Structure formats: structure tokens, C-alpha cells
């Protein structure tokens, strides 16, 4: 999956567009819930070396939030690592060129749900 395919998937599936909140950084984008503005993903360019690989190649990486019970279900063999530059107890890094597209889409959906507003709506007010 490319970064552009990631953005397209998020737009078509969740109706969200990339946001570039960091001054003078036009590559790092966050994906937010439209109602709460809460992040469910951050896309950035990171060296493979940051993930223990013997390469200085800079690739597209997406950090996603997972429920703690899902940690350990995915590993480096499918392109999933403890989060780069975020809380490793709650976030993972998905190396977009390495992870199978169906796995990426599944994890994006999990992150979207894990970060969604959990407030209970009264019946009839949804």
C-alpha cells in the first residue's frame, strides 16, 4: 500500500482527509475523526533503520492505535512494529510497503474504532 492509497482508503471508508498540523512539515499527516478531531492515524516518512533493519531507505509508515488485547497478534514478519515516536503500549507502526493491503486495511479500521468517541447516545439521539 502506498501513502496515497492509504489516504484514498481513509477518504472512501471513513470520509476523512489528511491534516498537516506540524509547521513546516508537509509530509507528516494525521487522520482524524471528523466529529471529535481525535487522531486515529499518523502517516510519516521514517528510515528502515529505526525499525532495526539494515537499511537507510526512508519509507512511508503509519502509526495506528490498537486495543491492548490485540498486541502480539501481528509482527515484523508482516510489517508491523512497536510504534515509532509514540506510546508503544497503545500504538503500532505499519510499514506501508511491507504490510499486505488487507492487513493494513484491517488495522486502520481497528484504529478508527479504538479512537472513536465512546459516549453512549440516548436512544433516538444517534
Image (tube, rainbow, N blue to C red):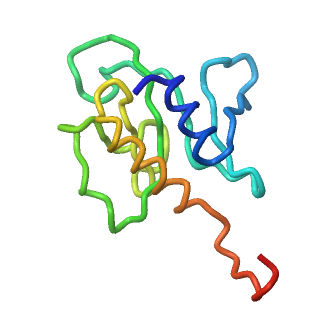
Q: Quadrant of the C terminus?
A: bottom right
Along the horizontal axis of the image, is 65 left or right of 72? Answer: right
Residue 73, image x and y in percent? 24, 56
- Front-lying residue, 117 or 22: 117
The quadrant where residue 12 appears: top right
As drawn, the residue found furthest toward the bottom would be 123
Along the horizontal axis of the image, is 112 left or right of 35? Answer: left
Q: Residue at x 46, y 57 (%)?
A: 110
Residue 18, image x and y in percent? 67, 32
Q: Is residue 8 above or below residue 46?
A: below
Q: Residue at x 47, y 40 (%)?
A: 63
Residue 43, image x and y in percent? 54, 31
As drawn, the residue found furthest toward the left would be 77
Q: Is residue 101 above or below residue 70?
A: above
As drawn, the residue found furthest toward the top would be 56
Residue 45, image x and y in percent? 48, 21
Report the number of discs: 0
Along the horizontal axis of the image, is 42 left or right of 53? Answer: right
As drawn, the residue found furthest toward the right would be 125
The quadrant where residue 84 appears: top left
Q: Residue at x 56, y 37 (%)?
A: 42
The quadrant where residue 2 appears: top left
Q: Quadrant of the N terminus?
A: top left
Along the horizontal axis of the image, is 107 left or right of 123? Answer: left
Q: Residue at x 51, y 32 (%)?
A: 6
Q: Is residue 76 above or below residue 71?
A: above
Amino acid at each position: 500500500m502506498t501513502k496515497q492509497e492509504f489516504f484514498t482508503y481513509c477518504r472512501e471508508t471513513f470520509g476523512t482527509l489528511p491534516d498537516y498540523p506540524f509547521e513546516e512539515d508537509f509530509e507528516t499527516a494525521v487522520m482524524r475523526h471528523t466529529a471529535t478531531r481525535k487522531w486515529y492515524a499518523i502517516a510519516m516518512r521514517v528510515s528502515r533503520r529505526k525499525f532495526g533493519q539494515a537499511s537507510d531507505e526512508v519509507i512511508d509508515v503509519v502509526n495506528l492505535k490498537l486495543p491492548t488485547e490485540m498486541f502480539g497478534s501481528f509482527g515484523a514478519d508482516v510489517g508491523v512494529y512497536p510504534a515509532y515516536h509514540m506510546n508503544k503500549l497503545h500504538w503500532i507502526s505499519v510499514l506501508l510497503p511491507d504490510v499486505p493491503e488487507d492487513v493494513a486495511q484491517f488495522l486502520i479500521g481497528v484504529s478508527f474504532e479504538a479512537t472513536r468517541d465512546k459516549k453512549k447516545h440516548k436512544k433516538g439521539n444517534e
